[in-house]
C-alpha cells in the first residue's frame, strides 16, 4: 500500500508541473491572465506562437507518459492483491489529476488533453493512434481545437469498449475504468468551450 501511495504522490507532483505557465513566465506572459486563461498548449500557442504551443504539448504529453512508463517497471506490491496494470493506472490517474488541479498554481490547471494522451499512449498505444487520428481529422475539418479534443475524448470512451474483447474483465478493468473516467473529465473541463461552440463564439485555430 505504501508503494501505491508513493507512486500516486510522485506522479501527481510531476503531472502538476505547469509547463505552459512556466514557459509563459519565461516570456513575461501570465497565461492564466491572458487569452483563455488556460495553461495548456492551445492558449500558449495563441499567446507565444506555434512552436511554443507544440513545446508545451510535448512536455505535457511527457508528464503523463513518463510516470506510467516508470510505474510499469515496478514490481507488484506483496502486501496487497491488485488488479493487473494497477500501478501504471494509478500513476496515470495521479499525473492526469496533477495537470487538471496543480498544487503549484492553486489547483488552476489545464484541460488534460496532452497529459491524458501521454497516459493512454503507454497504457493502450493502439487506442492512442486511433484517438489522435480522430483528433487530427476533426481539427483539419473544423479548425476547432476544442471540438477535436471533445471528439478525442468520446473516442477514448468508446474505442476500448468496442474493440477490446472483454473490457470489463479483471485483466482489463483498471485500464477500461481509466479511459472512461479520463474521457468524462476531459469533457467536463471543456464545459466553457461547449457553451461557446453552441453559441458560435468559439475561436478557431
Image (spheres, rainbow, N blue to C red):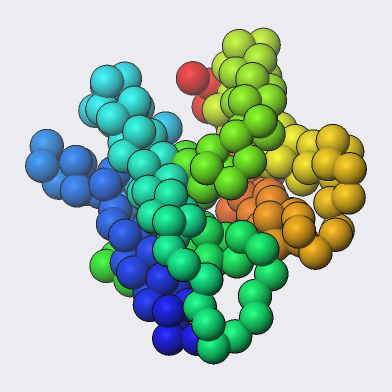
Q: Nearer the viewer, residue 96 or 203?
A: 96
Percent across and percent down for residue 157 are: 77, 45
Above or below for 72 versus 44:
below
- Splitting the image into 4 quarters, where does residue 199 fall? top right
Question: Is any part of residue 29 visible from this angle?
Answer: no
Q: Is residue 90 left or right of residue 47?
A: right
Residue pushed farthest top? 141
**At x 86% / y 58%, what residue is drawn?**
168
Above or below for 203 versus 109:
above
**At x 43% / y 79%, what residue is drawn?**
3
Q: Is residue 75 left or right of residue 176?
A: left
Q: How many marks?
A: 0
Percent across and percent down for residue 105 are: 29, 65
Q: Nearer the viewer, residue 191 or 173?
A: 173
**At x 60% / y 34%, what residue is drawn?**
125
Percent across and percent down for residue 4 are: 48, 77
Question: Is any part of residue 119 visible from this angle?
Answer: yes
Q: Is residue 112 left or right of residue 46?
A: right
**At x 19% / y 48%, what residue is drawn?**
22
Q: Nearer the viewer, residue 49 or 104?
A: 104
- Splitting the image into 4 quarters, where does residue 158 fall? top right
Amino acid at each position: 500500500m505504501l508503494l501505491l501511495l508513493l507512486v500516486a504522490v510522485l506522479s501527481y507532483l510531476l503531472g502538476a508541473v505547469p509547463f505552459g505557465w512556466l514557459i509563459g513566465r519565461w516570456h513575461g506572459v501570465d497565461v492564466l491572465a491572458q487569452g483563455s486563461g488556460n495553461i495548456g498548449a492551445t492558449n500558449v500557442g495563441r499567446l507565444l506562437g506555434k512552436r511554443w504551443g507544440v513545446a508545451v504539448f510535448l512536455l505535457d504529453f511527457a508528464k503523463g507518459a513518463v510516470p506510467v512508463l516508470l510505474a510499469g517497471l515496478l514490481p507488484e506490491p506483496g502486501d496487497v492483491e491488485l488488479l493487473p496494470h494497477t500501478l501504471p493506472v494509478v500513476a496515470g490517474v495521479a499525473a492526469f489529476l496533477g495537470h487538471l488541479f496543480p498544487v503549484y498554481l492553486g489547483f488552476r490547471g489545464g484541460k488534460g488533453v496532452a497529459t491524458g494522451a501521454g497516459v493512454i499512449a503507454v497504457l493502450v498505444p493502439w487506442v492512442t493512434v486511433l484517438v489522435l487520428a480522430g483528433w487530427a481529422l476533426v481539427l483539419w475539418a473544423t479548425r476547432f481545437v476544442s471540438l477535436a479534443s471533445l471528439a478525442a475524448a468520446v473516442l477514448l470512451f468508446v474505442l476500448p469498449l468496442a474493440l477490446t474483447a472483454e473490457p470489463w474483465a479483471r485483466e482489463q478493468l483498471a485500464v477500461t475504468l481509466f479511459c472512461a473516467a479520463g474521457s468524462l473529465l476531459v469533457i467536463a473541463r471543456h464545459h466553457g468551450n461547449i457553451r461557446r461552440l453552441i453559441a458560435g463564439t468559439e475561436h478557431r485555430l
